[in-house]
């Protein structure tokens, strides 16, 4: 099956731009790059995805979006944000509360809803991809899962300070760390264009916020690759109140289990591990599941 995989780091607000990057997985399990990450608003992202679908005659599309796709609460945080806040804050990060009172981002006329309606709405990660599906992901949580944190006095390390838009906290060495780690992932898959671009970003002396948006789009794409390569992933949250999909990791499962205990939630209902089977053997390393913490919730195989 020919599949289009898209990483979309949206800008949330209607007047801002985000970044989009895509690849096609062909019937023989190989990948075809679709150019470098590009800056887009929601309308441009929609047009680009539709053009890719037609041009490459894909049979399915998975869009990994860095923006909440299910927001029902009027105030405060979604339950999924409440759960992941602890692992993130433990590493000196923060997560924005999502609610419909933030009208520009999540009100009735927010651009994300039109985008989701155009591409099938928020998808169920535990069902096979058919047609076009959009999944919420979160680059910060992905970096924790992949072990991209940096040494610190805290056992879990600290998250990289790689946002050039925050000059007071931005670290050039942290920026290079994230670029290098992303380059290694795409190099393992022989993505020559993206690797060359990431290596160029890594050497930059003055990266811009737009560069981070494009880098985050690559991290969203990486989660799509983990899905298509049948690696073990996590679905944190639920379809009623919102969820996040990221690669699975023992340390993350352990901390999310603790978060569930503190908030009175049943771990197996709020943190689920799964692999997405496909009919084609894809290139790339296969993740071997040895995570007993995740196993306690049960692994979910999804046929399709």
Image (spheres, rainbow, N blue to C red):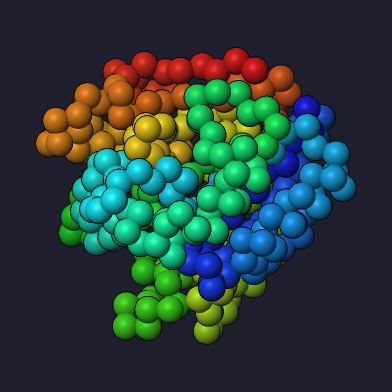
Q: Is any atom of residue 196 visible in this view?
A: yes
Query: What x and y, as percent, mark residue 268?
Result: 29, 22
Across and down, in percent, residue 79 comes to 27, 41
Viewer-nearest residue: 188 or 71: 71
289 or 12, which lies in front?
A: 12
Q: Where 276 sits versus 173, above or below?
A: above
In the rendered view, tell whether residue 48 sits above or below residue 145: below
Q: Is 112 or 80 nearer to us in this picture?
A: 112
Relative to 260, residue 147 above or below:
below
Percent x, y of residue 255 = 23, 38
Quadrant where the C terminus sits is top right
Classify 133 as above or below 126. below
The residue located at (64%, 42%) in the rendering is 119
How many numbered badges does the structure rendering display? 0
Where is residue 21, by image quadrant? bottom right
User: Which residue is depicted at the point 55% across and 58% down?
Assistant: 111
In which quadrant will I find the N terminus?
A: top right
Q: Give the left or right position of residue 206, taking residue 26 as reference.
A: left
Side (left or right) of 190 relative to 225: right
Residue 181 horizontal/vertical position (percent): 51, 56
The residue sitting at 42% across, 72% down in the picture is 163
Residue 249, visible in the rendered structure: no
Image side of residue 151 versus residue 290, left or right: left
Is 231 in front, or is 114? 114
- Which residue lies at the image location 60% right of the left edge and 23% below the top edge? 128
Within the image, what quadrant is residue 246 found in?
A: top left
Tell me where residue 97 sits by quadrant: bottom left
């Amino acid at each position: 099956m020919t599949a289009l995989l898209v990483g979309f780091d949206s800008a949330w607000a209607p007047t801002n731009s985000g970044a989009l990057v895509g690849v096609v997985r062909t019937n023989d399990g190989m990948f075809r790059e679709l150019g470098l990450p590009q800056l887009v608003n929601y309308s441009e992202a929609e047009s680009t995805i539709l053009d890719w679908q037609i041009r490459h005659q894909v049979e399915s599309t998975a869009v990994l979006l860095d923006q909440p796709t299910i927001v029902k609460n009027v105030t405060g945080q979604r339950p999924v944000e409440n759960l992941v806040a602890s692992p993130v804050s433990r590493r000196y990060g923060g997560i924005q509360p999502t609610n419909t009172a933030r009208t520009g981002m999540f009100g009735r006329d927010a651009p994300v809803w039109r985008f989701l309606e155009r591409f099938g709405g928020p998808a169920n990660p535990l069902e096979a991809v058919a047609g076009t599906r959009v999944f919420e992901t979160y680059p910060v949580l992905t970096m924790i899962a992949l072990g991209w944190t940096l040494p610190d006095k805290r056992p879990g390390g600290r998250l990289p300070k790689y946002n050039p838009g925050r000059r007071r906290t931005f670290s050039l060495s942290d920026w290079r760390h994230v670029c290098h780690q992303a380059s290694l992932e795409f190099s393992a898959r022989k993505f020559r264009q993206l690797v060359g671009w990431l290596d160029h970003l890594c050497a930059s002396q003055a990266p811009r916020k737009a560069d981070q948006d494009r880098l985050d789009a690559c991290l969203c794409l990486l989660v799509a690759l983990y899905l298509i390569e049948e690696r073990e992933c996590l679905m944190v949250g639920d379809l009623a109140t919102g969820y996040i999909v990221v690669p699975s990791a023992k340390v993350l499962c352990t901390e999310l289990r603790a978060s569930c205990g503190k908030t009175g939630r049943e771990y197996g209902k709020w943190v689920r591990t799964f692999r997405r089977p496909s009919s084609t053997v894809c290139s790339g390393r296969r993740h071997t599941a040895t995570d007993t913490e995740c196993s306690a919730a049960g692994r979910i195989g999804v046929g399709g």
